[in-house]
Amino acid sequence: MKIILSGGGTGGHIYPAVSVAEALKRKYGEQVEILFVGAEGKMEMERIPALGYPIIGLPVAGLQRKLSLKNLALPFKVIKSLSRARKIVRDFRPDVVVGFGGYASAPVLRAAQSLGVPTVIQEQNSYAGVTNKLLARRARRICVAYDGMERFFPADRIVKTGNPLRGTFGDVSAKRAEALDYFGLQAGKPVILLVGGSLGTRTLNEAVMRHLDEIVSRGSVQLIWQTGKYYAAGLDERLKNRELSGVWRGAFIERMDYAFAAADVVVSRAGASTVSELCLVGLPTIFVPSPNVAEDHQTKNAQALSSVGAALLIPDAEAVERVIPAAIALSSDRPRREAMRKHILALGIPDSADRVVREIEKVLEK
């Protein structure tokens, strides 16, 4: 069995593909040969080889939102990428090609479809992008994480598999004492976990700075604050003479299992993988969707949960003023947290990668 997995640009596209690759290897071992196809210069070109998988890069790139000379070269990169993708498919001769989104996914799936190779799409978000909607017309299966995706894709080919994740997620409460000790926090006080991704987010950092005196002086809550590497140095300078009792601050959280175990409330962006992780650990969450993403899909992801009582949604433009007071209020409202926990856990799919593998198998059987 030979399979091409394509996607990248961000961890949200890369790690679902890696999770499926690992599930395939667990089940088939040396009987499956996997080739990744990514975009030149993007993170997958380093991450995938480091995990032991071969990868080929395409010169494809995305449209720059601001006026840029780079956009003039885009049509030539697309043509070159389509040509190279056809050669990759011809040379590797895959039994199936699976696309996970990102720059490289479109030319590879288009090339495979034009050459009669079966394709599968894994759509991570609750709002499908234009490219996946076009590619879905000739895809054999569309694996989705949310209900109601019939408005984007042919209903007879949709299967709800959830988003494949790397690592083990589930009830982490048994680690709470150990986790509190790891972050230097006290038992008996609620903990707010604020994460903006590995790069960080200005909005969430400014929200904490606006309300930091309230957090520290009141002492009613504790905070695990992931600042992101882009903002760490600047915050170090702004806070160098501050005593922050009950606050753990760092550019990156190495032990997210401990962070989840310690947290009573989470404040987070609403990327697809993050949302799926939080559904599995069952933590009451306030989502602040990033406004700087294609088709505002993070807002759609957050709305899918907030509409069923599984999370709260605060727009980015209002977050500096509202999100920390809302998190403090939620941390002291146990009945509401329990209700949110029940609803968010109902949305989790722990065996998502295996479900995607089963859909690949069904396509191959046909």
Image (tube, rainbow, N blue to C red):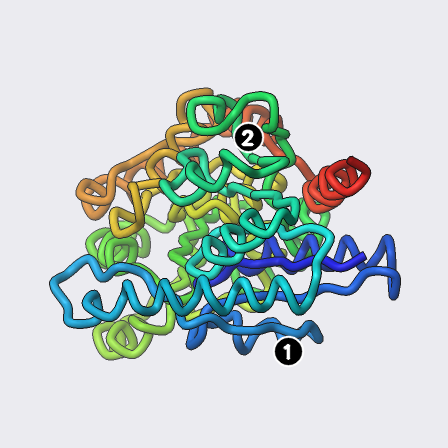
State the residue at coordinates (60%, 53%): 16
State the residue at coordinates (31%, 72%): 230
Q: Could you say which is closer to the camera, residue 241 or residue 62?
A: 62
Q: In this view, does 88 lie above or below 215?
A: below
Dot 2 amino acid type:
Ile
Q: Could you say which is closer to the camera, residue 161 or residue 345?
A: 161
Q: In this view, does 221 lie above or below 201?
A: above
Label 2 neighbour load within 10 Å: few <14, some 14-19, many 20+: many
- Residue 196, quarter of the rendered image: bottom left
Question: In the image, is 54 to the left or to the right of 189?
Answer: right
Q: What count of labels does the image hold?
A: 2
Provide the secondary structure element on which disc 1 rests: helix
- Residue 210, quarter of the rendered image: bottom left
Dot 1 amino acid type:
Ala
Q: Position of residue 167 (x, y in %)?
A: 68, 56
Question: In the image, is 292 to the left or to the right of 11?
Answer: left
- Residue 249, quarter of the rendered image: bottom left
Q: Position of residue 171 (x, y in %)?
A: 69, 42
Gap between marks 1 and 2, in whole Å? 34 Å
Kindly tell me whether residue 44 is visible in this rendering. yes
Q: Where is residue 224 in the image (x, y as percent from the top left)?
A: 45, 58
State the residue at coordinates (73%, 38%): 363
Residue at numbered disc 1: 50
Nearer to us: label 1 or label 2: 1
Label 1 neighbour load within 10 Å: few <14, some 14-19, many 20+: few
Q: Position of residue 277 (x, y in %)?
A: 57, 46
User: In which quadrant will I find the C terminus?
Assistant: top right
Kindly tell me whether residue 171 is visible in this rendering. no
Residue at numbered disc 2: 344
